Image (cartoon, rainbow, N blue to C red):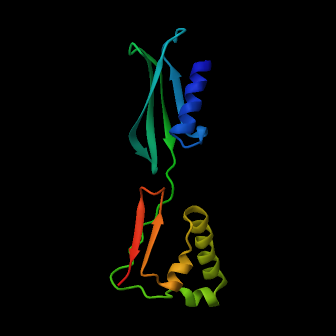
């Protein structure tokens, strides 16, 4: 049981990104012997209500199955915004910022998040209209460059 709990804890931290309550079920179907090396395999098998369903299989080094199960992982909300050709201009959206507390709260919330996460101000970009700006999403390997003409 200790090994089963350890595997469930591992899957909860790795596959479900720190949400062990998303592990739906695990079943022990074999025995673990002292000195056994266990191999945990996680595989994306399907989707359910927008969540990824992952199968869990643990075997020993001889290929004997010890544990099987599944986990359902909630996905982060993702938004793709395509502004369209020639639909932007310097300062666009700043009039409502000045006149609407709701618009100001949305802009300020976006600024707070983007500055804390990626060290840039979206309102600074909108107001300043820089000719070039490099933003590092996820570290220096992933870059977004904004170039305007």
Q: Is residue 149 left or right of residue 58?
A: left
Q: Residue furthest top?
A: 34
Q: Please tell me which residue is depicted at 42% across the width and 55% down the height of the picture.
A: 141
Residue under the image location 55 percent in, 8 percent down: 34
Image quadrant of residue 80?
A: bottom left
Rendered residue at 42%/81% (across/down): 131
Q: Nearer the viewer, residue 106 or 148?
A: 148
Q: Quadrant of the N terminus?
A: top right
The residue that appears at 51% across and 85% down in the rendered structure is: 128
Quarter occupied by the C terminus: bottom left
Instruction: Return the x and y of residue 111 as percentages of the image width and height.
Output: 59, 72
| 111, above or below 42, in the image | below
Relative to residue 7, is residue 118 depicted above or below?
below
Q: Position of residue 9 (x, y in %)?
A: 59, 31
Query: How many numbered discs?
Result: 0
Q: Is 136 left, or right, of 114 in this rendering?
A: left
Q: Residue furthest right?
A: 101
Q: Position of residue 67 (x, y in %)?
A: 49, 21
Considering only vertical position in the picture, is 28 above or below 143?
A: above
Q: Position of residue 22 (x, y in %)?
A: 56, 40
Q: Between residues 85 and 146, which one lies in front from this camera angle?
A: 146
Above or below 136: residue 84: below
């Amino acid at each position: 049981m200790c090994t089963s709990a350890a595997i469930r804890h591992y899957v909860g931290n790795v596959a479900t990104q720190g949400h062990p309550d998303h592990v739906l079920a695990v079943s022990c179907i074999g025995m673990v012997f002292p000195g056994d090396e266990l191999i945990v395999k996680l595989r994306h098998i399907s989707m359910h209500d927008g969540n990824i369903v992952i199968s869990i299989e643990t075997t020993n080094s001889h290929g004997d199955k010890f544990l099987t199960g599944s986990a359902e992982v909630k996905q982060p909300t993702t938004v793709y915004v395509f502004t369209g050709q020639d639909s932007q201009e310097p300062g666009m959206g700043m009039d409502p910022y000045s006149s609407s507390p709701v618009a100001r709260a949305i802009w300020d919330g976006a600024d707070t998040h983007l500055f804390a996460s990626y060290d840039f101000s979206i309102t600074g970009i909108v107001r300043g209209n820089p000719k070039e700006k490099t933003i590092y999403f996820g570290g220096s390997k992933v870059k977004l460059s904004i170039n305007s003409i």
